[in-house]
Image (cartoon, rainbow, N blue to C red):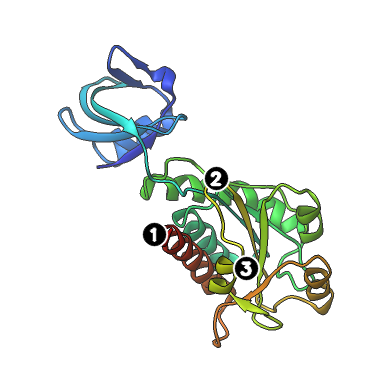
């Protein structure tokens, strides 16, 4: 079933009324929705509604709620990605896949070997947020992630926003992700910041920062991966190790 985000205020007497133009046009003009069709809706409280379209007028859609429940399509911990943006399609791929893999937000970071300068990144943030929104609908995310403003590794680490911080490095790595989970497992409800560098890798200065601040530098194996591949492999393995840890404990 198609999946759309709504506000809880749209619900009254078991009827959800959809009047915003974006959702209306997508349903009526793109999907050519008709009376009697089923549609999944989710509100800001992560409540999922299984509905059936009861009425379509020139400016609104009325959906009858058949069933509602708390959505489970979210991670049990807060996953944040600090990533050095790539050029064009590669970065769009990263944004889409990071959304599918459950990140709470993506934070573009300027690194010494970053492919884009700050002004270019800032102009692309709105577009990346739109990609995250559309990807969230496609994979039925319970929460819409966001792309934050441009930052730096130093500022993010100094903010103390995150319970744990790790960096994936193609060189200078000291342990595997499995080693990290054994020594310092990510607990339910905790926040984890994952740092992934540009195509050219981190600089010696950045490696030095990781060492000075005891930020674990983890390996993804013996193969050298493209930056966009590293993002999907890293996030996928984190989700696997989290589930594997709690499956045994």
Left or right? Give the position of 164 relative to 119: left
Q: Which mark is residue 189?
A: 2
N-terminal-most mark, 1 or 3: 3
N-terminal-most mark, 2 or 3: 3
Quick check: marks 2 and 1 in contact, CB under 8 Å? no
For the C terminus, the quadrant is: bottom left
Q: Is residue 210 above or below residue 109?
A: below
Q: Which mark is residue 247?
A: 1
For disc 1, the neighbor class at 10 Å (few under 14, some 14 to 19, many from 20) is: few
Q: CA distance from mark 2 to mark 3?
A: 33 Å
Q: In front here: 164 or 150?
A: 164
Q: Which residue is mark 3?
A: 87
Left or right? Give the position of 25 relative to 164: left
- Identify the residue at horizontal 53%, vertical 52% (top origin): 103
Give the foreground label among 2 and 3.
Answer: 2
Q: CA distance from mark 2 to mark 1?
A: 16 Å
- The number of numbered discs placed on residues in the rendered structure image is 3
Q: In front here: 85 or 241?
A: 241
């Amino acid at each position: 079933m198609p999946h759309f985000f709504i506000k809880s205020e749209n619900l009254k007497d078991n009827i959800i009324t959809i009047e915003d133009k974006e959702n209306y046009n997508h349903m009526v003009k793109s999907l050519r929705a008709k009376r009697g069709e089923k549609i999944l809706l989710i509100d800001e409280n992560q409540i999922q509604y299984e509905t059936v379209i009861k009425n379509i007028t020139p400016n609104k859609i009325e959906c009858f709620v058949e069933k509602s429940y708390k959505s489970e399509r979210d991670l049990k911990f807060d996953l944040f990605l600090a990533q050095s943006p790539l050029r064009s399609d590669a970065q769009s791929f990263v944004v889409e896949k990071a959304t599918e893999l459950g990140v709470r937000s993506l934070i573009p970071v300027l690194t010494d070997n970053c492919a884009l300068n700050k002004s270019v990144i800032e102009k692309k943030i709105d577009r990346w947020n739109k990609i995250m929104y559309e990807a969230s609908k496609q994979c039925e995310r319970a929460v819409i992630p966001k792309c934050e403003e441009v930052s730096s590794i130093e500022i993010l680490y100094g903010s103390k926003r995150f319970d744990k911080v790790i960096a994936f490095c193609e060189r200078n790595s000291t342990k595997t992700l499995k080693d990290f989970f054994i020594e310092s497992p990510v607990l339910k409800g905790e926040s984890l910041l994952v740092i992934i560098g540009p195509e050219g890798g981190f600089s010696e200065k950045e490696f030095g920062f990781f060492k000075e601040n005891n930020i674990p530098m983890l390996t993804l194996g013996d193969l050298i991966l493209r930056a966009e591949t590293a993002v999907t492999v890293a996030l996928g393995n984190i989700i696997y190790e989290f589930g594997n840890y709690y499956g045994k404990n």
